[in-house]
Structures are given as structure tokens and as C-alpha cells.
Amino acid sequence: MRSPIPDYLAEALGSVEFDQSGATADYIPELADADPDRLAVSFCTEDGRRYSQGDADVEFSIQSISKPFVYALALADRGFDEVLAKVGVEPTGDAFNELSLEPGTGRPLNPMINAGAITVHTLVGPPGATPEARNERIVDGLSAFAGRRLRVDQRVYESEISCAYRNRALANMLRANEIIDEGPLVAVAGYTRQCSLLVTVEDLAMMAATLANRGVNPVTGAPVVPAAVVRQTLSVMATCGMYDGAGDWMTRVGIPAKSGVSGGLIGALPGQAGIATFSPRLDRHGNSVRGVDLFRRFTSDMGMHLM
Ligand code: DON
């Protein structure tokens, strides 16, 4: 019997297709030029079944959706104590590119904002790892989550690094507070490279499904990170993954999630599935307008809300 799921997903895309509200990110030239009409969705279940519709084979840069996965790698490589000493787990209520440091310690409040993610980037790999080895570990690790070899989009990287003044300012403050112990320019270059990795919505669904499946990729069977690391990562996604839209997201959609400025959005439903959408127009929080709408619909149709 033919599965009804592809028809359901096609119909869901059709229901948001005509919404043209929001705008592509304009602070990174390559993203401002992206086709705003792209629209895609993908599901990957905990037992490895995959369903996609729309522009599911179009590649785009992962941007902030890299943050939870790199956080998971840092926790696996350095342990909870070392990572928590440098980056907190509290939501900010502020935009993703605010400094948002904890008074007293100078730690970034959480790993999903840029200041936290730049810090987390420096905590991947063994202590003293070279920036090149760290970049390689991140490509290898995120590729294991995605079940295929990912690559950096050099044009996106060059475009973002050419105007990364704000992230450099954040990194300088982190260095001044001794939260990072290396050159701010090196940290921002590596972080920007991590954000420039190319993915499809199908890759993102598999990456989210690996989190939903306690750290084991449900398609390749590869163990990527330990279950305790996944629990920490999903918890931070639930409270901080949608930035200053996190409360609204948690009440209305109700699953751990992460957005990115190129228009990707992932949700992980523990023990069940990873879900990803792609639509580049963003709301004022930097979250995909049609992606958020699709997830709201999935929650009301399928009862995904965890509460
Ligand atoms: O650092 C930046 O600003 C971008 N590379 C990533 C920001 C991002 O994706 C925020 N998410 N919505």
C-alpha cells in the first residue's frame, strides 16, 4: 500500500506556499541573494524511514543549526564540567547576536547564541588541538550526524567573514574575559567555517533524528555522541534554540528545535523522529516564517507537543 505521508507533506507545503512574509537575512551578502521561494520538508524516523517533499535536494549553508551539533561534539570531547565552566545554559530573551554574558563570570549565557557558539567552537577536540584539526573534527562529526560527507561552501564563508565585524567584537570580549584562550580572529574564522557547511533538508532531518535516537544515526547505525550528551543538547535546544522566540515556540510547538539564518529549521522528537524544513524568509527573531508555520501545523496534526 502506498504511504499517505508524502501526500500529507505535499499538502502541508501547499498550505504555506503563498506566504511571502519575512525577509532573507541581509547581513550576509550570499544569504541576501538566496532564492526566497525555496520550500522543503523532510522527516527521518527513529527506525530510519525518510520522507521528503519540495526542494529537498537543494543545498544551503547550515548556519546556526550547526550550534547544537558542535555543542554535542564539545561535550563529548571535553566533558560537561569543562564546557559548563565556559558557557552557561540559560535563555537570554535577547537576539542571537547580542553579547549576553553572565554578570560575574563573563560566560556567554548559552551555546545557541553567537557568543556561546564561538566559545563552544574552541572547545572541540582534545585540549591544544590546532584550528585545522578542530575544523576537521567538526566536519567529520557533523557528517556522521548527517550520514554523508559534508563540505564547506567557500563563497558563503568568504561572504560572511568579509563582514563579520560583530562576531569579531563578541570574540574580542570573550578573549578579554578569558573565556576563550586563543586569538579572536582564529575563533571567528573557525566558527564561520562551521556555519558555512552545506546541507539539504534531508541531511538536517537525519541529523535531528540522530539526536532523537539517543545519538545513534538511525540510517547508518553509527554511534555519534553518547546519550547523556544528547540529553544536555536537546535540553538547551528546548530552552534556547529559537532565541528570543523560544517561549512562544515551546508553548505552541513544544519540541526541542534549532533555526538558522539561511532558512533551515530542525526539530527533534525524542524516540520518534527528526524533522527539518527549509524556507529562507525569516521573522524578526531570525527564524524561518514558513518553517515555524509548518511545525505548528505538524504539532496540531500529529500531537508532537511533549507536554
Ligand atoms: O554568526 C552568524 O551570525 C551566522 N553565521 C549564524 C547566525 C544564525 O544562523 C542565527 N539563526 N537564526
Image (cartoon, rainbow, N blue to C red):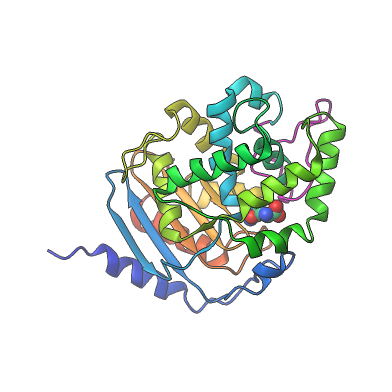
Q: Residue at left 58%, top 32%?
A: 74
Q: Is residue 71 magenta?
A: no
The dominant secondary structure in magenta is loop
What x and y, as percent, mark residue 165?
83, 55
> Is 233 or 179 nearer to us in this picture?
179
In the shown orientation, is residue 146 left or right of residue 250? left
Can residue 237 be seen from the camera position used here? no
Instruction: Work out whether 254 lies above or below 9.
Output: above
Taking the image as shown, residue 252 lies to the left or right of residue 83, namely: left
Give residue 272's position: percent from left, percent from top.
33, 43
Residue 89 counted in the magenta span: yes
Residue farthest to the right, as pictured = 176
Instruction: Identify the image quadrant of the C terminus.
Output: top left
Q: Residue furthest left?
A: 1
**Rendered position, 207 above or below 133:** below
Task: State the residue in front, 150 or 307.
Answer: 150
Q: Which residues are magenta?
A: 88-113
